[in-house]
Image (cartoon, rainbow, N blue to C red):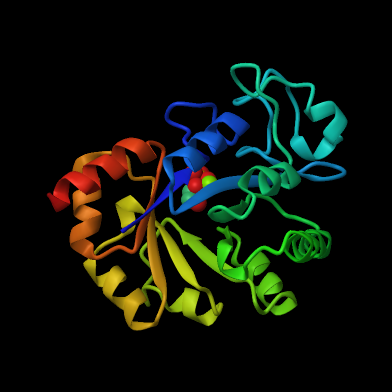
Amino acid sequence: MKVFAHRGASGHFPENTKSAILEALKIGVDGIEVDIQSAIDDYMLIHDSWLDRTTNGTGKVNEFHVSELTKLNAGNGEVIPTLQQLFDWNNNKTLLNLELKHAFELEKFATQLENNISARKISCANVLVSSFDHHQLLWLKRRLPWLKIGALTSSIPINYAKFAEDLNAYSVHVDKSFVNKAFTDDAKKRGLKIYAYTVDKEQDIALMLDYGIDGIFTNYPTQTKAYLLSLQT
Ligand code: G3P
Ligand code: MG
């Protein structure tokens, strides 16, 4: 079962910051999930559309320029990173799961993604764009047919993972409270990967293993990897 660092190694470092990302890379996770919001002039790693919870700023991310946002404290004196910085730090080491959080100018995002991937020689296998907004995913998949997309849900749809298959997704990402054996089996039958978020407790990790989940997003990748290893011995 793959282990993805949720918002970086956010259990021990401020979420979606450089320290959380570098720690995840040091641990050797199978991927790093980050949340993307759009500022006026670039894409930033921050979960909420409002600055207030995770920074000392106030107001909406999309009403500021990068130069203003990077003056804020995102926890322990860290700044809100840009998407470019994430690509720099990762340097092709692991899979990046970019979760699009808000209504984006998708053409601008697609162009920037394409440019990054070609300039940095990133393998398409190592980029996975996910969203709860399936309209955004559909648009992106049509614009960039090679892009792996992950359909997020916090529900058990009537036809289980059919919505993700219809989107031509690579994976379906399900809230751990709504995933079960039937959902897992259905996703696999459709040729989709199924990942669960946010899984931190050993009891929940064991349950995901029982279901046959392909990967989990966790705030504590070190502990999660150690627990998974302990089950093998
Ligand atoms: O991408 C999985 C998970 O991060 C989705 O929920 O609110 O933690 O971004 P949230
Ligand atoms: Mg997220």
- Looking at the image, can residue 64 be seen? no
- Looking at the image, can residue 217 be seen? yes
Picture quadrant where residue 44 is located: top right
Which residue occupies the foreground of this view, 217 or 131? 217
Determine whether 8 is above or below 164 in the image.
above
Residue at image position (60%, 45%) is: 35
Residue at the outermost left position:
233
Residue 91 placement (x, y as % from top left): 64, 50
Residue at image position (32%, 82%) is: 189
Determine whether 203 is above or below 98 in the image.
above
Determine whether 133 is above or below 40 in the image.
below
Residue at image position (61%, 26%) is: 54
Residue at image position (49%, 60%) is: 152
Which residue occupies the foreground of this view, 23 or 142? 23
Q: Is residue 202 left or right of residue 142?
A: left
Q: Is residue 218 left or right of residue 59?
A: left
Residue 78 placement (x, y as % from top left): 65, 23
Residue 222 placement (x, y as % from top left): 35, 37
Which residue occupies the foreground of this view, 167 or 31? 31
Q: Is residue 69 left or right of residue 125?
A: right
Q: Is residue 32 left or right of residue 71?
A: left
Split into 4 quadrants, where in the image is the N terminus? bottom left
Figure disc tally: 0
